[in-house]
């Protein structure tokens, strides 16, 4: 086997591999053996038919295809090992000649990565404070969940519940998609609908009808409606007063599932809020660190790797659509984009993902970050211990599965790395 290497721009390599007829012959023989094991050839046991008979039975082209598959895999791997190439993508194969076999394999290799002056990066932890209003908001939400509703004949005001039919129209009078609803529940003042819309409901009674125009905010999440004037027609179907339960020891027992004084419950709510806020602050700190590392990172992303990452992200979208019961074609129609346009949009995020991986791999090496299996097993025991006793064995077994084990191992490595960047807390 003869091979030559050509280094291309963008951390790519082209390997040209040539086999003589004699070197290709064993692959044809192997292909014939495999084919003969899968089919019946009269007069021969499976796997023992001679090459000539197999070729006559399935055709020269089918035999050649099978032989090429074996030859490409083996000779490409051999060339990569001999050249000690750190390949990071699947090869793109271009067959120049089939017999004797000549082909080129273009593949991306690990590029040079530099994270400049990374030791200067320090990210302090954001201070967490719990305000009394936050605790009161939680209690108010618990009250709402257990609220009672009483039909009213009076005009509605903030805090009342209204059920209404509504529909939106453009300035030409055409009905707008996504602006129609029947028996839509809303508590006035909670801003589940636009604030200007809810304000229009105040003073109405059951059976009232109304038309009004509002302008959607310029930063409205659904871009086609941003800064758009829409005329709404509404009819109030039902109005109710919201009666919130009083916060007493009895109310707390119903909510918490145990007897507890209101003051103690408020304390627990505050502690839970603090725990969640600390987790959020830690997550935000990690995100900030990643962004900072990216700013310090210089690396050329190979085009082939970028192409693979975009394809992977596209498959994620398709899988998500399928899981939610939608067709990808409907997603494209909704976005008013072609698949190629979606790929182009994904390119920037794909490049960012790759740069993050390269930067972290580089830092793991330069900082000599390693995680022993023992450390992972210790972490698994800690996690399992946090579950009810009857669930601990199941949790332990799940975490010890290879994919979960490796995910946990990577997480521990990240935590070790991140510790080097934390400033004073």
Image (tube, grey):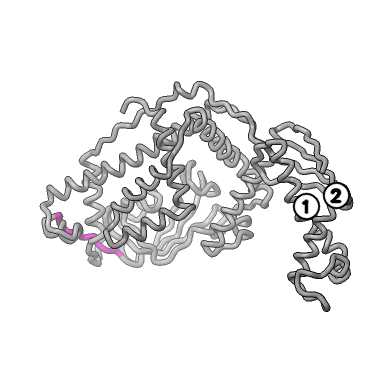
- Circle 1 — which element? helix
Q: Out of 105 and 274, give the one closest to the viewer.
A: 105
Look at mark 2 in the image and give the residue it sits on: 101
State the quadrant of the C terminus: top left
The local crowd at label 1, few if under 14, some if 14 to 19, many if 20 or more residues have their Cα within 10 Å, is: many
Q: Quadrant of residue 414?
A: top left
Specify whether residue 126 is painted magenta.
no
> In the current view of this chain or complex, which residue is farthest to the bottom?
42
Q: Is residue 238 above or below residue 127?
A: below
Q: Residues within 10 Å of mark 2 (few under 14, many from 20)?
A: some
Residue 124, position as x, y percentages in the image: 36, 28
* x and y percentages locating residue 43 in the rendered image: 83, 78
Whether the residues at callouts 2 and 1 have beta carbons within 8 Å, the answer is: yes
Residue 81, x across and y down, in percent? 69, 40
* Residue numbers of the magenta segment: 239-247
Q: Is residue 306 visible?
A: no
262 on left or right of 236: left
Q: Residue 240: within the magenta?
A: yes
Q: Which quadrant of the view contains residue 186?
A: bottom left
| Label disc, if present, on residue 17 of the rendered structure | none
User: Is 43 placed above or below 380 here?
Assistant: below
Can you identify the residue that label 1 sits on?
71
Q: In which quadrant will I find the N terminus?
A: top right
Residue at the spot 29% in from the left edge and 64% down from the top edge: 239
As helix, strand or loop, the secondary structure at mark 2 comes to loop
Q: CA distance from mark 2 to mark 1?
A: 9 Å
């Amino acid at each position: 086997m003869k091979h030559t290497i050509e280094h291309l721009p963008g951390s790519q390599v082209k390997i040209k591999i040539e086999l003589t007829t004699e070197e290709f012959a064993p692959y044809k023989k192997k292909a014939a053996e495999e084919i003969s094991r899968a089919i019946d050839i009269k007069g021969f046991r499976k796997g023992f038919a001679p090459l000539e008979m197999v070729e006559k039975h399935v055709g020269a082209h089918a035999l050649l295809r099978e032989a090429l598959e074996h030859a490409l895999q083996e000779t490409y791997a051999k060339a990569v090992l001999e050249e000690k190439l750190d390949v990071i993508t699947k090869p793109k194969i271009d067959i120049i000649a089939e017999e004797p076999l000549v082909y080129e394999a273009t593949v991306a290799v690990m590029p040079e990565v530099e994270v400049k002056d990374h030791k200067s990066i320090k990210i302090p932890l954001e201070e967490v404070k719990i305000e009394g209003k936050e605790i009161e908001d939680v209690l108010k939400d618990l009250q709402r969940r257990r609220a009672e509703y009483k039909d009213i004949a009076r005009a509605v005001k903030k805090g009342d519940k209204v059920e209404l039919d509504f529909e939106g129209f453009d300035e030409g009078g055409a009905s707008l998609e996504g602006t129609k609803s029947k028996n839509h529940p809303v508590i006035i003042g909670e801003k589940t609908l636009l604030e200007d819309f809810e304000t229009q409901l105040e003073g109405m009674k059951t059976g009232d009808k109304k038309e009004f125009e509002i302008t959607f905010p310029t930063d409205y999440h659904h871009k086609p409606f941003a800064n758009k004037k829409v005329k709404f027609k509404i009819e109030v179907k039902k109005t109710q007063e919201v009666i919130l339960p009083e916060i007493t020891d009895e109310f707390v027992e119903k909510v918490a599932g145990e007897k507890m004084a209101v003051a103690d419950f408020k304390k627990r709510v505050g502690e839970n809020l603090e725990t969640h806020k600390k987790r959020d602050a830690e997550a935000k700190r990690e995100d900030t660190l990643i962004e900072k590392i990216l700013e310090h990172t210089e690396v050329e992303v190979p085009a082939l790797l970028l192409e693979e990452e975009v394809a992977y992200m596209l498959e994620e979208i398709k899988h998500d659509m399928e899981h939610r019961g939608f067709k990808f074609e409907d997603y494209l129609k909704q976005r008013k984009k072609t698949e190629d346009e979606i790929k182009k949009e994904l390119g920037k995020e794909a490049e960012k993902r790759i740069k993050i991986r390269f930067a972290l791999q580089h830092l793991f090496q330069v900082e000599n970050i390693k995680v022993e299996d023992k450390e992972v097993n210790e972490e698994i025991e800690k996690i399992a211990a946090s579950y009810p006793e009857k669930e601990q064995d199941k949790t332990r077994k799940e975490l010890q599965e290879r994919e979960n084990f490796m995910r946990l191992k990577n997480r521990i490595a990240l935590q070790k790395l991140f510790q080097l960047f934390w400033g004073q807390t």
